[in-house]
Amino acid sequence: MSVYSTEKLVTEARRLAAEYKKATGKALGISTEIAEFDAASKLNLELCDDRSQGYDAIGKGEREGQRIQIKGRAIFDEQKSGQRIGQLKTEQEWDSVILVLMNEEYEVTEIYEARRAILLEALNEQTSSKRNKRGAMSVAKFKIISDLVWTHNNGLMPTTQQNPTT
C-alpha cells in the first residue's frame, strides 16, 4: 500500500502531465486514468478491477448497478475541431458511457453521460463511416446526444428525461 492517497497521486499526475505538455508540446497518455478517478469521485461510481467485461465502473446511488464505460479527453485548443473520444466497446455489455472533458491543466470542466441505446443509434445512423463502424465518435456528436451531468461551476446537474439513469 502506498503512503500517498490516490487523490494526491492523481493531483500530482495532473500537474506533471500539464507541465510535460507545455515543455514538449506532446500529451502524456494518462487522461483516461485521470478521467476514471474524477468520474468515480464526482458521480459516485466504483471502478472495476477487471475491465475486460467492457465497462470501467459500476454505479452507486442513483446509478446503482449501472455498468459504465468511462472516456476522457483533455481539450488543449477549443478552436480545434475534430476532437474524438476513444473507441466505444459496442460488442460488449454496458449501460452508459461517461465522457470526462478536461482543460489543458487536466482539470475536469464537464462530464457528459449517454445511454447505450442512444449511442448505438447514433453510430448506426452514420454506418458509411469506418470510424463509426469501429465505435468512434467525435466529442461534439457525443455532447449533442448525451446529457451534461456535472460541471466545474455547478457540480452535479439534475437528471434529465432525455437520458434517464434507470
Image: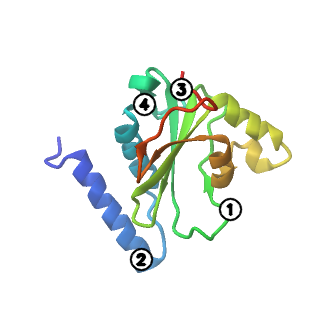
Which amino acid type is shown beneath numbered disc 1?
Gly
Q: Which mark is residue 165?
A: 3
Give the structural element (helix, strand or loop) at label 4.
Answer: loop
Q: Quadrant of residue 122?
A: top right
Q: Nearer the viewer, mark 3 or mark 4?
A: 3
Which amino acid type is shown beneath numbered disc 2?
Lys
CA gap between label 2 and label 4 equals 34 Å
Q: Which residue is mark 2?
A: 22
Q: Position of residue 24 (x, y in %)?
A: 44, 78
120, 49: nearer the viewer: 120
CA gap between label 3 and label 4 equals 23 Å
Asked if marks 3 and 4 touch (Cβ < 8 Å), the reply is: no
Q: Which residue is mark 4?
A: 50
Q: Quadrant of residue 46?
A: top left
Q: Which residue is mark 1?
A: 82
Asked if marks 1 and 4 touch (Cβ < 8 Å), the reply is: no
Give the structural element (helix, strand or loop) at label 1.
Answer: loop
- Lateral position of residue 28 relative to residue 137, left or right: left
Q: Which mark is residue 66?
A: none
**What residue is shown at x 62% (from left), y 71% (from top)?**
79
Q: Position of residue 159 (x, y in %)?
A: 51, 32
Q: Quadrant of residue 43?
A: top left
Q: Position of residue 77 (x, y in %)?
A: 56, 70
